[in-house]
Image (tube, rainbow, N blue to C red):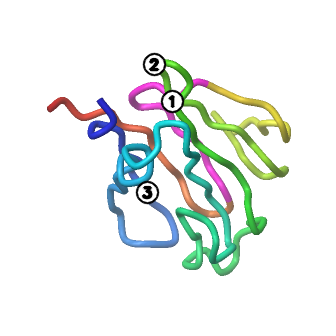
Amino acid sequence: RSERYFLHVEGAIKEMDIALYKWLRLAPDRSVTIGKSVDCSIQLSWDVNGQVAPVQAEIHRHIDSIRLTALEEGVFVNNKPLSPGSEIWLYHGRKFTIGNTTFTYIEKDL
């Protein structure tokens, strides 16, 4: 169920959890975008010094899994760059970094 998907955010901002289901529940095929653009679902306006593109990455549901796709260079998983156009499966506890912000994917039980 979509109400269990969250991103824990830490870095250039006070730590918090962002509920991905806000976007995924409205339209199951909708993407959650991350970047500096005001059009992004998660706008990294707090990351003033980080190298963040207007639309850096997107998260979407694929069948029964959640996927992260790098749209620009600068997305890191386990300190290794994720090439633009590449996609990874997000599982509970998986971390990725954009600019100076680290995201941890969390699935909470209902």
- The magenta segment is 89-98
- Which residue corresponds to the image point at 75% horizontal and 43% vertical from the top-left? 70
Kind of residue indicated by mark 1: Ile
Query: Which of the 4 image quadrants contains residue 47?
Result: bottom right
Quadrant of image for the N terminus: top left
Q: Is residue 57 left or right of residue 27?
A: right
Residue beneath label 2, please?
64
Q: Is residue 94 magenta?
A: yes
Can you give x and y, in whole percent of width and height, for residue 69 in the image? 70, 38
Helix, strand or loop status at disc 3: strand
Q: Disc number at residue 9?
A: 3
Viewer-nearest residue: 91 or 26: 26
Direction front: furthest residue: 27
Direction top: furthest residue: 64
Can you give x and y, in whole percent of width and height, for residue 98 in the image? 66, 55
Can you give x and y, in whole percent of width and height, for residue 100 in the image? 62, 63
- Which residue corresponds to the image point at 62% horizontal and 49% vertical from the top-left? 97
Give the main secondary structure of the magenta stretch: strand
Q: Which dot, 3 or 2, sits closer to the camera?
A: 2
Residue beneath label 1, please?
66
Can you give x and y, in whole percent of width and height, for residue 101 in the image? 56, 60
Kind of residue indicated by mark 3: Val
Kind of residue indicated by mark 2: Asp
Q: Which dot, 1 or 3, sits closer to the camera?
A: 1
Viewer-nearest residue: 97 or 88: 88
Helix, strand or loop status at disc 1: strand
The crowding category of the residue bearing disc 1, from other C-alpha atoms within 10 Å (few below 14, some 14 to 19, many at least 20), is: some
Direction left: furthest residue: 110
Q: Is residue 86 left or right of residue 110?
A: right
**Vertical position of residue 45 compared to residue 26: above or below:** below
